[in-house]
Image (cartoon, rainbow, N blue to C red):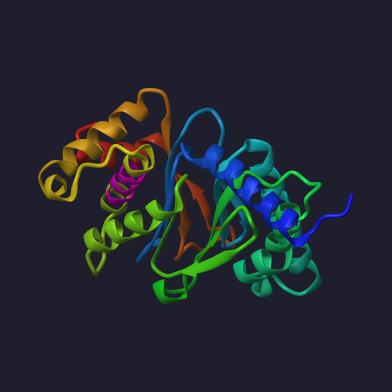
Amino acid sequence: MVYTPYDWAQVLRQKADYVEDRLRLGSPVIAISYEMGVLIATVRGAQRKIYEVYDRLAFAALGQQADIEAVRMLAVDFAHVEGFQRSPEDVSIQRVVGFAVSPAVRRAFSDPFRTPFVVRGLFAQVGESTSEDTFIVLNYDGEFSQRERVAAIAGVIGVEGKMERFVNDHLESGSLPLDEVLQIALMAWALGKVEAEGNAPSETEEREVSQDILGDTLKRNLMEGKVEAVLLERHSMNERRFKLLTDDQIEPALERLRI
């Protein structure tokens, strides 16, 4: 069968509609750079959503679990080969995404005869200072973009910017304890969930009722799920910076939110 340029463009549109429909109600993920490291947080069901890629690198995603796992393995395999052939210091999130993950995802999306990856991913790398922290957001078509200070992924792309602005508006300069940063992250998560579900109030009402709506949304989702949070530690003496937060470490943030 011969595909014309029109046929090819039509297939891409159909693929995009197919993937976006399945991502729409996915659980958002938020990543924040602060003094102690990079905090990544979400609310999940049974399956993990945040993974270690390499010593200073992490990956989180929403989408179909099989596709998330395929992207994770691409990233992990490339990172470890890079670390072995070059050096651990040469392993960067830019190379992992740019040389291994993005081309594979783009090929699957562009090929009319292949099923696209149903996934939207967030990659994070912790540096020696907040200015060196790196975030990359990867879309299902293989396109990716870099973020500074905060990055978010959600089922609806336009929601991500609102989540990031929320964090920037509430994250004060200077040192903050982990529970305060996690509190901001969870409220940003709730904002992403509300917006993606189309339940956001009008702009005239937002200032008055948004905190109640966000709190109720978080509380409702925690009835069937749980908070998953990871800290990529900046000042750890260990090469492995990936630290999965325990329930005891998460609980103070929920108490601050009265949940």
Q: In this view, does 191 lie to the left or right of 16?
A: left
Please say whether residue 128 is visible from this viewpoint: yes
Q: Where is residue 247 in the image (x, y as percent from the top left)?
A: 39, 35
> Mostly what secondary structure, the magenta segment?
helix
| Name of the residue lying farthest toward the left | 208
Front-most of residues 126 and 201: 201
Q: Quadrant of the C terminus?
A: top left
Query: To which quarter of the image does residue 105 belong?
Result: bottom right
Q: Position of residue 85 (x, y in %)?
A: 81, 71
Front-most of residues 113 and 149: 113
Query: To which quarter of the image does residue 129 belong?
Result: bottom left
Residue 238 in the image: above or below residue 153: below
Front-most of residues 238 and 227: 227
What residue is shown at x 46% (from left), y 59% (from top)? 233
Q: Position of residue 159 (x, y in %)?
A: 38, 51
What residue is shown at x 28% (from left), y 63% (from top)? 168
Q: In this view, does 167 lie to the left or right of 230?
A: left
Q: Where is residue 186 in the image (x, y as percent from the top left)?
A: 32, 44
Residue 139 in the image: above or below residue 115: below
What residue is shown at x 48% (from left), y 62% (from top)? 236
